Each structure stands twice: as structure tokens, then as C-alpha cells.
Image: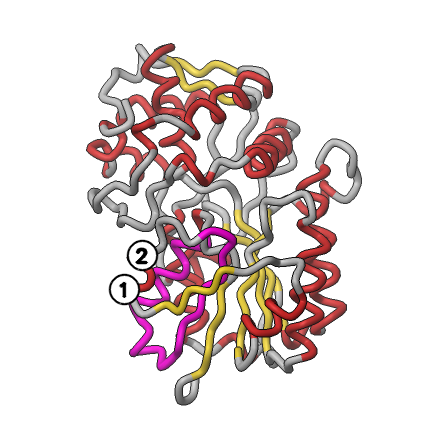
Amino acid sequence: MSSEQLLTITHIDSLPGYALAFRLAEERQQLNVRMRGLCRDRHGLEELEKQGVEIMQVDYQDENKIKQAVQESRCVFMIPEHSSNRVKEAEMLMRVCKQVKVEHMAMLSWVGMDAVQHDRERYRNLNEYHQIEEKLKQQFGEQHCCIIRSTLFNQFFYYVTPMVEDRNALCLPVKQDQRWGTVDLRDVVEAVCTLVRQNVQVGRGQKHLYRFTPTHMMDGREMARGMAEAVERSPEELKYHQIKQEEMWQHLKRIRDDDRFRERQPSGGTETRYTVPIGRYLTDRCIEVLLEFMELASNGKAEIKSRDLKEILGREPQPLQEYFKKNRDQFKRFR
């Protein structure tokens, strides 16, 4: 990017928003950008401010507030809100960005969108992401927008660690024999940072759609074997159990208030302070999205392979088995 451009990221009070803002802030000087982060709640964002990110608390339904928040931005990276008005809020954000002449707009979405649009009732939340994707392309055109579709982050497995301890099994609402995959959030934010560094956000002649997936898919048994390493059990001892969505819903609601997930954990293994999830990220709407994605996976609609992440990183994305092995000490904190 040229001299002192403003890069704005929305929903920094979410796991991917916080991680992306923090990672880009670390390279702020090298990238020659100013950083602004938008949030509903400033709680817990003090470290981002120390990194030089200008924090703005906004009401995503207040047009004047949004206009003030995105003014002077060259690029806005939108992470859709976990709210009941997700689409309307995104529409307003995109419209205002266009009005104030934001040059380029990007968004984080989910893989599997092609399947989602054919079953809108079952995947109500994920379909909203698809609607936002379409509106983004309409508003900015493919030359001036970028959509990054990601699968579930490896970091989700921290949330299920207490259940693994209690039941001696990896319990997910996904069929045991169904193959699917997850990616490390660190790889995702590193890839986005690389795209920014390469000035891809200018957009002309560049891809407008990226799919961030692992290169190897796994079934439930393979995931359980990896999880066994993370929680220091033998692979023969720790099994995989498919559970109902309601059971996972109740578990994640309990985790939201679990003291082990109250504060950000220090760096360790391959994790940094900004990639380990905390309980307050698990709002009801966030849980709904996670459950819908796992249902998508269970129905065989998330077994999607792409080389995009590998090509941007210039290496293989970290395999889940390796991730479990290298972060045993982190998993130990949640047992």
C-alpha cells in the first residue's frame, strides 16, 4: 500500500476480528497503514489499542455512526456480525462505504455456500452470509471486492476440551464417517496479512474469491486420534461420539460462562494471545452459526479442498494432527 492508508476491520470483538486486527497491527509500520477497528463492546480490547489500533464503538444500524467510522478508509474488511440483523447491518455498512468512496471491501465468509443457498431453511444463518456475499459483489463489483471463505478454525477444539475430559471422547454433531476439515486461525490471518502486503486489495486482475481449507480431510476417528494427543490420552482410549445439536448447544452455552475461558491465555505452542478463543465470543447467534456449519459438514457439504491457503502462505497449512501435538500445553489449560 502507498503512504499511510487507513485499513478498517469490523467486528473486532469476535475471534477472527480480534486476531486479524492484532496481526495486521503487528505489521502496521511495514505495511504503512493506519488501523481502525469497529466493535459493539470495547471490553477486552485494550491490548489492541496498545498495538496502535484506533478502536471505535459503533451501532451498526446508525448510518451517521457508520459513516464516521469508515470515513477515509481505503479498505474495509467486514466480518459479519453475530446479530439478528446481520444482513441489514451489512447492507448499511456496504452502502455507506460506497458513499464515502472506500476503494476496496473484503469479507470473511464460510465454505459451502453453494450448498447453503439450496437449503435456506436449514442453514438460515449461513444463508445470510451468502446474501451478504452477493450484495457485496453487486455494490462493489468483483474488481473491488474480495470474499474469503473459510472452514471452521482449529481453535474451536478448545471449546470442546472440557467435554472430552468428562466423557473420554471427542463429541461433535457430525457423522463419524464424514470427512471434513478445519484450519488454523493463525494461518488464516497470516494469509490475509500476506494479501494485504502484496497489495491485492487494489483488486484489478486479482481473484475476488478465496477458499481457505486444509489440504487433508479427516473423519471423526482421525480427529479423535489427534485430540487424544492434545489431551494426553492414548488413541485407543479416546473415541469419537456423534452427539445431537442440542447437546452441543447446551455445552457451548456453559462454556460461555466457564472461568477457564474468561480471560485470554498467554502465547504458547503455535498460539498467540490473539488466537486462543474466550467464552464471551460464544453469543447465541455465534453458536447457531457454528452448529449450522457442523450440520453442513455432517451432510457432506463441507468436504471442500482448495489450494488457495497453501499458495498464499507458500507452504502447507498446519495439519490438524500437528496442531494438536504442538499445542498440548494450551489444551491442558482447559481440561
Extent of the magenta region: 17-41
| Residue identified by numbered label 1 | 50
Label 2, secondary structure: give it. Answer: helix
- Give left or right: position of 333 versus 24: left
| Residue identified by numbered label 2 | 46
Give me the residue at 68% from left, 40% from top: 125
Give me the residue at 37% from left, 62% from top: 314
Disc 2 residue type (three-letter): Glu
- Give left or right: position of 238 versus 292: left
Name the colour scheme: secondary structure
- Give left or right: position of 132 versus 193: right
- Do callouts 1 and 2 mark residues in contact (Cβ within 8 Å)? yes
Residue 22 x, y percent position in the rendering? 35, 60
Quadrant for the N terminus, please.
bottom left
Q: Tell me the crowding category of disc 1: few under 14, some 14 to 19, or many 20 or more residues within 10 angstroms, Cα based.
A: few
Disc 1 residue type (three-letter): Lys
Asked whether residue 273 is drawn in magenta, I would say no
